Amino acid sequence: MGKLDGKIAFITGGARGQGRSHALTFAREGAEIIVCDVAEQIPTAPYPLASTGDLTATARMVEDLGRRCLAVQSDVRDSDQMREVVERGISEFGHLDILVANAGIESFGKAWELTDEQWDEMVAVNLTGVWRSCRAVIPHMIERRAGVILMTSSIAGLKGLANQAHYCAAKHGVVGLMRSLAIELAPYGIRVNTVHPSSVDTPIIKNQAMYTLFSGGKPDATLEEVTPAFRDLNLLDVPWIEPQDISNAMLWLASDEARYITGVTLPVDAGLMAK
Ligand SMILES: NC(=O)c1ccc[n+]([C@@H]2O[C@H](COP(=O)([O-])OP(=O)(O)OC[C@H]3O[C@@H](n4cnc5c(N)ncnc54)[C@H](O)[C@@H]3O)[C@@H](O)[C@H]2O)c1
């Protein structure tokens, strides 16, 4: 028996990285999966976002586990697209139990040097996109008087970071959204929580722009050169954690084992916040 037998989960940004890991973890525990991903480049992200091939690959991997998967190329910045993917999912699977609002981007710059475009795209994806994803599923969850909403924030949603004021502002904003929704949705039996990873081994950190930032500006810095800097962030002796570590926390929060947990900010951070 799986922890999510009979459940339907919608995961945004599921073409790769943590979103794909959540999809596969939930599928292994019995859930049918709906994934969406923008699957094209967003101009201010200084690294490649996922492709349509990545999105199709996630769907195939879920199906290889014997579960159904609806994979749709859609953008969390677009309310109509969010409503459409949710409606398609509900008509295909019958209902929807879990949202993991995971889609996100990174970009860098001192707060006073960020462009309007960097700020606006960051907030549009990492904060407003989370709200748009929630708004698309909430009426259905209210009708069923059940549901779980999980949001991927970051340790950047709990503390400030140099060169990432817009990312931190968006990820802190997600916490305010979660806390308010937890209050508004508790009467309907819907739980809402945030998860706060430190560095996770995915393309959002494994890219040249990040290595350059971590090296203090060296354009050709290598992963090997910056690994000690990643390691120094954490209390535990690892430079980064695995997507599966975040999926394990998401699975627990999504399952009935966490049935009385709502309104919490859960760091999964190798001790970064405690350091
Ligand atoms: N990897 C880390 O170190 C780390 C740490 C803390 C928090 N996070 C957060 O975890 C989440 C998942 O990131 P990841 O580590 O898997 O990185 P990733 O880049 O591999 O995955 C993010 C996915 O979101 C998709 N996406 C981006 N904008 C989108 C949009 N507008 N609509 C739909 N999909 C969109 C991307 O195409 C990509 O597939 C993000 O919210 C990120 O901010 C990551």
Image (cartoon, rainbow, N blue to C red):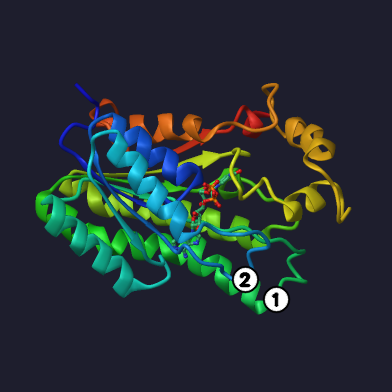
Q: Amino acid at mark 1?
A: Thr
> Crowding near pointer 2: few (<14 within 10 Å), some, many (20+)?
many
| The residue at label 2 has a CB less than 8 Å from ligand 1 | no
Q: Does residue 264 show up?
A: no
Position of 105 with respect to 194 (left or right) is: right
Secondary structure under the numbered disc 2 in the rendered image: helix
What x and y, as percent, mark residue 18?
A: 48, 42
Q: Residue at x 39, y 39 (%)?
A: 22
Q: Residue at x 76, y 71 (%)?
A: 112
Q: Quadrant of residue 233?
A: top right
Q: Does residue 207 show up?
A: yes
Q: Residue at x 23, y 58 (%)?
A: 138
Q: Nearer the viewer, residue 36 or 233?
A: 36
Which numbered disc covers residue 119? 2
Position of 194 with respect to 238 (left or right) is: left
What x and y, as percent, mark residue 171?
A: 54, 54
Q: Amino acid at mark 2?
A: Trp
What x and y, as percent, mark residue 244?
A: 47, 31
Give the quadrant of the C terminus: top right
Give the quadrant of the N terminus: top left
Which numbered disc covers residue 10? none
Secondary structure under the numbered disc 1 in the rendered image: loop
Position of 196 with respect to 67 (left or right) is: right
Q: Which residue is disc 1 drawn over?
A: 115
What x and y, as percent, mark residue 223?
A: 77, 40
Q: Nearer the viewer, residue 269 or 42?
A: 42
Tell me the distance, in whole angstroms, between the alpha carbons under discs 2 and 1. 6 Å
| The residue at label 1 has a CB less than 8 Å from ligand 1 | no
The answer to the question of whether label 2 and label 1 lie on touching residues, with beta carbons closer than 8 A, is yes
Q: Is residue 107 above or below residue 150?
A: below
Q: Nearer the viewer, residue 36 or 177?
A: 36
> Crowding near pointer 1: few (<14 within 10 Å), some, many (20+)?
few
